[in-house]
Amino acid sequence: VLCEPTLPSVGTVSLEPSSNSPELPKSVPLPDSIDTRFYRARIDRGTGALISLKLKPSGREMLGGLANAIVAEKPKTQAGDPGDHMLDRPERLALANSSQFLPKISVQSGSLATIVRIESGFYGGGGMIRTICFYDDYPRIDFETELNDIPDSTVVVAEFPLSEEIVEIRRGIPYGFSHAAWSRPNPGLHGRTEGIVPAVRWSHYAFEGGGGVALLDRGLSGRETTGRTPIIFLLNATDKYYGYVNPWLSGKGKHRLEYALVAHDSAWDKARIPQLAWEFNCPPVTVPDRGTTAPRSFVKTSENVIVEAIRREGSDIELRMAECLGIAGYAEVKLEMPHEQAALTDLDGANRVPLKPS
């Protein structure tokens, strides 16, 4: 069920159920283009891939090929136990591509979004279902890919070829991000981009003339870039790890993988990619059968800070925050809970430096 409530920052709000029947989405043919407030997108009827994403109002094309194409691969040579490590893409052999399988495409159009469902076969004989959600009034495009019975020692990735050269890559790490050059060297950027790299919640690919594309994920930490094509790792199917049977890593059964794309014309510090990634990873928690209360926010910050954790620690309220833009500046934090004083500490809560209220 899709809805669009107004939610306070790190807070609570009461939502009253409506007695009116919801407006049900309608089944419609796949349109030539899907138009939203932020972009115009096109789906290829023969493959189910996203083939065009033009931003509004600029009309700038962000894709350079079949995006959300699902590829099955395996290492050309397997050293040690499967899953012990993963070889970089030049050392992997392509086994199958989603474009090889005839898709059945269905579309649901509602008041908040257009949802495209692509059903097809895939490598190993199990069916695959790709679902793409295009929100009318929100820049994020959500993907869910369902894989079934992927054979042992198979890597499954999703490709997102881009239309322009990637000059810089950022990727989320705990309490910050790595920032590195890509298409040409930049000694001033010390992050790492070569080969397979981990990402926490998001990765971002910046273009020469400004703007770029971000890939968000829910627990899919693997990233790799070849030329203009970032990929996100969906599954590394391994029936055994260090010789032991491990159902957690096996490709057997059903696997649902969730990730998202955000494209933008604006500068990096205006695109709010880390915030969008946190929103994708922290959906609202609903608690039924509670009394009505006014909307309340417990913590508010300036745009350059994200609160990554808040908890009770003895008699203290502990907030763990991170500067999220990589730009020096002032930050504001407002805690709307009863408290007597505040202090900066180290990660263990020690070495307190008292803070004065503004």
Image: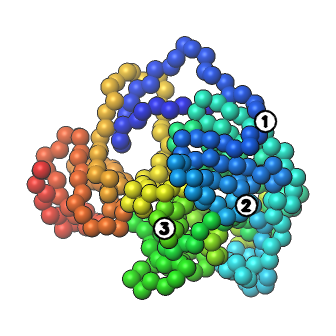
* Residue extending farthest top: 19
Q: Amino acid at mark 1?
A: Pro
Q: Position of residue 73 (x, y in %)?
A: 78, 71
- State whether residue 195 appears in this view: yes
Q: Amino acid at mark 3?
A: Gly
Q: Which mark is residue 29?
A: 1
Quadrant showing the N terminus: top right
Q: Eyeballing the image, is 224 above or below 100?
A: below
Q: Which mark is residue 66?
A: 2
Quadrant of the rendered structure where residue 267 is?
A: bottom left
Q: Which mark is residue 209?
A: 3
- Total marks in image: 3
Whether residue 80 sits left or right of residue 21 in the image: it is: right
85 or 356, which lies in front?
356
Residue contact at pointers 2 and 3, CB within 8 angstroms:
no
Q: Earlier in the sequence, mark 1 or mark 3?
A: 1
Q: Eyeballing the image, is 71 above or below 55?
A: below
Q: Position of residue 199 (x, y in %)?
A: 53, 67
Q: Tell which tag, 2 or 3, sits nearer the viewer.
A: 3
140 or 43, which lies in front?
43
